[in-house]
Image (spheres, helix red, strand yellow):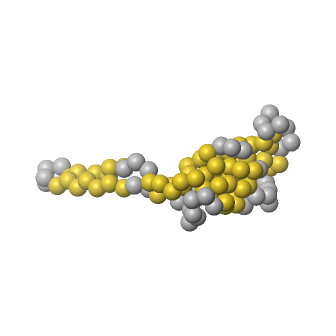
Amino acid sequence: MAKIAVIQTGGKQYPVKEGSKITIEKLDAEVGSEIKFDNVLLIADEDGSALDLGNPNTGKTIVAKVLEQKRSRKIRVGKFQNKTRHHKVHGHRQHQTVVEIQSI
């Protein structure tokens, strides 16, 4: 039976399965290297049986492989003040890491 888990990294929580690819906030790791997620909040079978719920975490680790370091699409941020002919627009691109879950 396949297992699912919920991990926390970068202030966000992600549901993962073995072999799944997720895009998370930037981690300092080389492409091709393995990283371990220690903050595992939940591990269960796919049908919901054998539930291991952490308080706050389970104490287990999940191994993932870094596939890519990239940047997200550009987000445009604009300020506008009415009646003063003032407007300012600038962009932002967030750094991201794509990882593939190896084992739960």
- Please tell me whether residue 40 is drawn above or below residue 21 in the rendered image: below
Q: Quadrant of the N terminus?
A: top right
- Please tell me whether residue 48 is drawn above or below residue 92 in the rendered image: above
Q: Residue lying furthest bottom in this view?
A: 28
Q: Residue lying furthest top in this view?
A: 47
Nearer to us in this view, 22 or 67? 67
* Residue at horizontal 73 percent and vertical 55 percent from the top: 62
Q: Is residue 34 visible?
A: yes
Seen in the image, is 55 located left or right of residue 92?
A: right
Q: Is residue 55 visible?
A: no
Question: Residue 84 location in percent, x, y?
Answer: 13, 54
Seen in the image, is 40 located left or right of residue 78?
A: right
Seen in the image, is 43 located left or right of residue 66?
A: right
Question: Residue 24 location in percent, x, y?
Answer: 56, 53
* Residue at horizontal 68 percent and vertical 43 percent from the top: 19
Question: Residue 21 location in percent, x, y?
Answer: 61, 45
Quadrant in the rendering for residue 47: top right
Quadrant in the rendering for residue 30: bottom right
* Residue at horizontal 64 percent and vertical 49 percent from the top: 100
Question: Residue 79 location in percent, x, y?
Answer: 26, 53
